[in-house]
Image: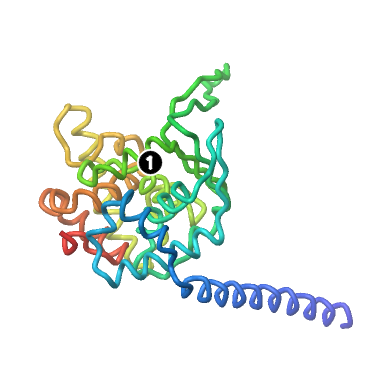
Amino acid sequence: MIIVKIGAVVVGLVVAFFVVRRLSRQARRRRVSALPFPGEWKEIIEKNVPLYKRLPDTLKDQLQGLVQVFLDEKRFEGCGGLEITDEIRVTVAAQACMLLLNRQATYFPKLRNIFVYPHTYVAKTLSSDGRVVVDRDSVRLGESWQNGPVVLAWDSVKGGTSNIHDAQNVVLHEFAHQLDQEDGVADGAPVLSRRSRYVAWARVLGAEYDTLRSSKKKRRRSVMNKYGATNPAEFFAVATETFFEKPKQMQKRHPELYDELREYYQLDPLEWA
């Protein structure tokens, strides 16, 4: 009986610890997001993130608060000799936080570190044919590790922000992966607001993924980058890029897909135009 009581007390203390920590984190986030937004940060966003200028004022204010919390919690590290500056941090944060607008922001809870290279980098990958493991060099613009960091190439970040109509944005892409991975699986199905929504999500995105695979195989033109035909996780990331940067084309050619993403992101980029 004593052992049972002690065990219950320990469990209660552990639960209380996590509750207090969560409440403390939420209180800190409210304080940080309410701080005056630095003028120099706003100038960086206006210069480097053209999509920001299309947002209504209410979303601009919301984005600024999200950026402040994001930068308070995430650690940036330069690679390949790159020195991390406010321009890099704010430019990346502003685009990543676009994906959190109008939703209950979790601030990419599994992400702690963001590594930034000055340019496209070469990563080592291991592949196997069942008998022999081969070490291959892989040239990358960015990557998102499950339960790990996001890696970005700064020249690709700047290139992706300069043209908001090409649906190629490495930050939106890699942070969409972070959203997808929040449930522990990179499968193109992020955490949805209601369990009942997964049926429609699977039906619509599954069909659209198959269509993109067919378009790639038959070399047909598509609104979305054919890289999305790689697997369902890449499809979700590519669809996210297209949703934010080519909303008119996506809504016209893939209305059901657009509606699913609009419901998920709680945003309608068509209204910003």
Residue drawn where x is 27% and y is 70% of the image:
57
Up the image or down, 122 lies above or below 22; here it is above
Which residue position is annotated with label 1?
Answer: 157
Q: Name the quarter where the C terminus is drawn.
A: bottom left
Give the percent coordinates (x, y) of residue 60.
32, 66
Up the image or down, 170 lies above or below 191; here it is above
Give the percent coordinates (x, y) of residue 163.
24, 42
Q: Identify which amino acid the numbered label 1 is placed on.
A: Val
Q: Name the quarter where the N terminus is drawn.
A: bottom right
Up the image or down, 158 lies above or below 199; here it is above
Residue lying at the far left in this picture: please name it: 252
Residue drawn where x is 13% and y is 48% of the image:
249
Horizontally, is 217 left or right of 132 in the view? left
Residue drawn where x is 37% and y is 36% of the image:
156
Callout 1: helix, strand or loop? Answer: helix
The residue nearer to you, when weighing 161 against 167, is 161
Give the percent coordinates (x, y) of residue 89.
47, 50
The residue nearer to you, when weighing 54 against 167, is 54
